[in-house]
Amino acid sequence: QEGENIMSYQPFTEQTVVEHVRQLGYLQEGIAECEEIGDGNLNLVFRIRQGEQRLIVKQALPYAKVVGESWPLTLERAWIEQLALREFATVASRYVPAVLGSDRTLAYTIIEDLSDYEIVRTGYLKGESYPELARHIGEFLGETLFATSDYAAGPIAKKRIERDYYNPELCDITEKLIFTDPFKDAESNNIEAALREDVERLWQDQALKVEVTKLKVGFVTKHEALLHGDLHTGSIFATQQETKIIDPEFAFYGPFGFDLGQIIAHLTLSTFHDPLKRFERFTDVLTVWETFEKTFRANFERAVEPFNTDGFVDELLRTVFSDTIGYAGCELIRRAVGLAGVADLETLPEATRLERKRDALALGTALIKERHGVESIDDLVTLLAGVRV
Ligand code: SR1
Ligand code: MG
């Protein structure tokens, strides 16, 4: 824990957060501008400005904002988030914001201001493109997934890092909202009446449910590397040249393919909103995977014994690839019927929205069931692009 802190937890207001960071020495006396800009599902986010000084303070609430106080949620996630940002920065500092401060009791992290950047999902909804984004994401994942794995750190060092990322409550949200609830008549679901029949058909697909169970087992049992855990386009800030990955409060040790699958699902969802960007976004899918693979393979040259066995990395990447496809499928389905919808779908006019949600269900099902038969990233892109929009 940084510094001495005698305060107990209180959610900040625009006034109290300014006073707090002033006491810490980040601000001078006098007027500072402060705005709460959080539009995510869980936290408060304050942007503070005074002259040249610009800061972001992100504070966890003790409940899930998207549902309300009836869904209590651990404040420890804020501590895990700043630890993960610092860990990622050790090998990929160009792709994460600088952490300026953090407090475990008050559950906040202070990061550099990213006002010159835009949240990628928001940019996409306005028709924006980010030409470097896919390569940056691929490099970020190739660097961080390797660096935090057994293959780089060795089993003892890796297990020491892993201890810090025991994140059961946030993992439980993912397990329920992605792998369990969308596949049954759960209270948390948000199913449009006109989609009910389609979703009921999904619930009767026993072969699909077996495959989803296998993917969930992989999520809970494969402690391969430190994941971001929620890598959608709302967790990425970008400009035309730069990319910053934020919000790793769901960070934990999980399967290599999970973050890859999530970002591929969200690149695909963005084409459901803007079909004219299909070629660009599917090229991005290709670039994310190819850059990840190239970076991971290059790093693997220095894998520790006995993992540096000839041919092992090829086998490993084949499994990561099929896991990636399966996790992308689960994410597509949950964003169409689960608790946390996405603006890419929700802002569409009704008739188109229903069609695109059906497409998400069909494509998600195909990815999950056919993942072992997809031989290459080109085949995956062909499968993704096969959905009519
Ligand atoms: C209750 S939290 C709902 C969703 O928001 C987060 O961003 C994660 O995606 C989570 O599944
Ligand atoms: Mg988030």
Image: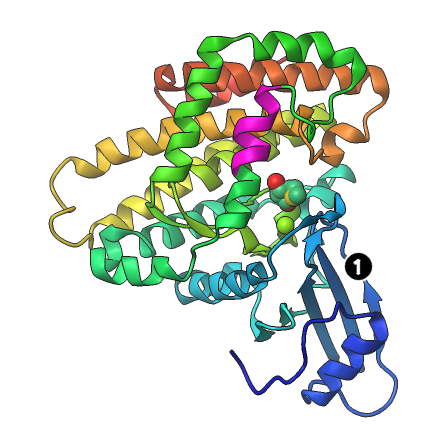
Q: Residue furthest front?
A: 70
Asked whether the viewer can see residue 362, the reply is yes
Residue appearing at x 57%, y 20% in the figure:
183
Q: Give the main secondary structure, helix, strand or loop, of the magenta stretch.
A: helix
In the image, which residues are magenta?
175-184
- Given residues 21 and 268, the one toward you in this image is 21
The percent position of residue 89, horizontal first and vertical second, equals: 46, 65
Q: Residue furthest right?
A: 31
Kindly indicate the quadrant of the structure image that contains residue 53: bottom right
Please check the rendered image and state whether residue 234 is part of the magenta-colored stretch, yes or no. no
The percent position of residue 171, horizontal first and vertical second, equals: 50, 44
**Residue density around tag 1, few if under 14, some if 14–19, many if 20 or more, within 10 Å:** few
Tell me if residue 15 comes above or below residue 311 in the rendering.
below
Residue appearing at x 70%, y 73% in the figure:
55
The percent position of residue 24, horizontal first and vertical second, equals: 67, 87
Task: Using residue 292 as the reference point, say whether residue 70 is left or right of it.
Answer: right
Q: Which residue is mark 1?
A: 37
Please check the rendered image and state whether residue 178 is part of the magenta-colored stretch, yes or no. yes
- Given residues 229 and 324, the one toward you in this image is 229
Tell me if residue 308 comes above or below residue 260 in the rendering.
below
